Structures are given as structure tokens and as C-alpha cells.
Amino acid sequence: MILIINGPNLNLLGKREPEIYGHRSFSDYLPDLHAAFPEEELCYEQTNHEGRIIDLLQAFGFGQAEGIILNAAGYSHTSVSIRDAIAAIETPVVEVHISDIRKREPFRHTSLLTDVCAHTIIGHGLDGYRQAVDWLISK
């Protein structure tokens, strides 16, 4: 099983800044992901709460999932606690950013999570999630 965790404001995909994040909601995209990987069990959670992200990482990070895909959104740039949770668990975490954070506002250029994640995918839109699943399967 691969767990996908989307953080704050990603429930607004398709509505919020579509010029940056696109016109599709994650709910609209998820069936495409299931179709691309019919043999994989993909579970999806979205939360606007930092503590919930940490709870999910801890709950699935010790063998309950073969991999975790995390788009921590704004928390990527601010959360030492999420970073510490990723560093503490055994399950590999792939960090995904829909937009290219290196080409956005300067405060978004650095992710506190990157160096504790097994892999990072930046700026490939929603296809970054497919790339993350593919990467996890190949490992």
C-alpha cells in the first residue's frame, strides 16, 4: 500500500490559483492514478492540519505502507515537526510539489523536508504523483 498525503489548501486544487496549480482537483485526478497503477493499493488523505500529517506519518511509517507520498504544501517550508517525523520513520517518503518552488517566491525556495525524504519531485504538476508512485514501485 502507498499512502498519499496532501497538506493544507490542496483541497482547493482546481479552484485556487489554477495558473499555478492547474484546473483539476485531486479528486478528479485520483482515478487516473488508480488506472495507471491498478495493481497498487493507493490510499489518499488530505488535511489542513500539521498534527494530522505527523499522525499519518507515524501511523504508516513503520511498515504499514511500502511508501508515502507527501505534498506538505506550505508546511514544507516551515515545519520542523514534519521533518522530524519523516526522519523518525522507516517507510520511504517521496516529497512532491506541484509547482516549481524554485521559481516562486523566495520563501518557497527551501523545503525543510527534502534532505530527509527518499526522493523529491518538483514542478511536474499532478503528474508528479504518478512519478512518485513509479519511483516507489521501482525501489
Image (spheres, rainbow, N blue to C red):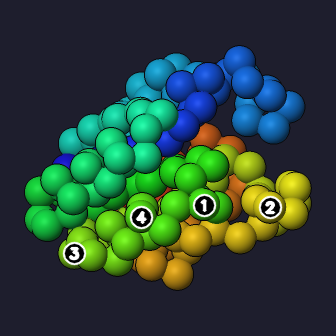
SS state under label 1? loop
Percent position of residue 137, x then y: 32, 64
Q: Mark 4 points at which residue?
A: 81
Q: Which quarter shows the C terminus?
A: bottom left
Q: Mark 3, mark 2: which one is toward the viewer?
A: 2
Q: Residue at x 64, y 61 (%)?
A: 77
Alpha carbons under labels 2 and 4: distance apart: 18 Å
In terms of depth relative to the viewer, which is nearer, 23 or 8? 8
Q: Name the residue under label 1.
A: 78
Residue 90's disc is 3
SS state under label 3? loop
Would you say the residues marked 1 and 2 are in contact, meaning their CB atoms lie under 8 Å apart? no
Q: Answer with mark 3 or mark 2, whichever residue precedes in sequence.
A: 3
Q: Answer with mark 1 or mark 2, whichever residue precedes in sequence.
A: 1
Percent position of residue 65, x then y: 18, 57
Q: Is residue 13 above or below residue 75?
A: above
| Residue 36 occupies quadrant | top left
SS state under label 2? helix
* Circle 4: residue type: Ser
Q: Mark 2 points at which residue?
A: 107
Q: 83 left or right of 139?
A: right
Alpha carbons under labels 3 and 1: distance apart: 22 Å
Q: Residue at x 63, y 26 (%)?
A: 13
Alpha carbons under labels 3 and 4: distance apart: 16 Å
In terms of depth relative to the viewer, which is nearer, 115 or 39? 115
Would you say the residues marked 3 and 2 are in contact, meaning their CB atoms lie under 8 Å apart? no
Percent position of residue 12, x then y: 61, 23
Q: Mark 3, mark 1: which one is toward the viewer?
A: 1
Question: How many neighbours does mark 4 have within 10 angstroms: few (below 14), some (14-19), or many (20 or more)?
Answer: some
Alpha carbons under labels 1 and 4: distance apart: 9 Å
